Amino acid sequence: MKWSDISAIAEALYDKFPDVDPAGVRFVDLHNWVVGLDDFSDDHTRGGEKVLEAIQAAWIDEAR
């Protein structure tokens, strides 16, 4: 997965952390969780605030 795979990342986070409320996740933690996903293979430094916001929003939608 790359940072641009917002939906796939959100689904993977939902599957890995089913009991976590994504709305309360800090961006530092979110970044660490994304780069720690088994299928993640992008540059760790490219996950900026806008990308993390998009991932968090998609994760919130996935959790509904």
Image (tube, rainbow, N blue to C red):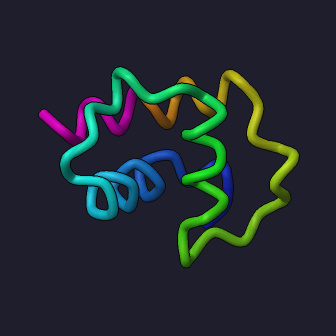
Quadrant in the picture for the C terminus: top left
Vertical comparison of 26 with 19: above or below: above
**Residue 17: quarter of image:** bottom left
Residue at position x 33%, y 63% from top?
A: 16
* Residue 37 placement, left or right of 8: right
Taking depth in this image into account, of 47 and 17 the one nearest to the observer is 17
Residue at position x 56%, y 76% from top?
A: 39
Total marks placed? 0
Quadrant in the picture for the N terminus: bottom right
Range of the magenta residues?
57-64
* Residue 16 placement, left or right of 34: left
Where residue 15 appears, as percent x and y from the top left, is 27, 62
Vertical comparison of 59 with 19: above or below: above
* Residue 40 placement, left or right of 9: right
**Residue 62: quarter of image:** top left
Residue at position x 87%, y 46% from top?
A: 45
Vertical comparison of 60 with 18: above or below: above
Considering every residue shown, the one lying at the far bottom of the view is 38
Where residue 59 appears, as percent x and y from the top left, is 34, 38
Vertical comparison of 42 with 4: above or below: below
Where residue 56 appears, as percent x and y from the top left, is 45, 31
Where residue 57 appears, as percent x and y from the top left, is 40, 26
The stretch drawn in magenta includes residue 11: no
Residue at position x 40%, y 48% from top?
A: 10
The stretch drawn in magenta includes residue 62: yes
**Residue 48: quarter of image:** top right
Q: Predominant secondary structure in magenta?
A: helix
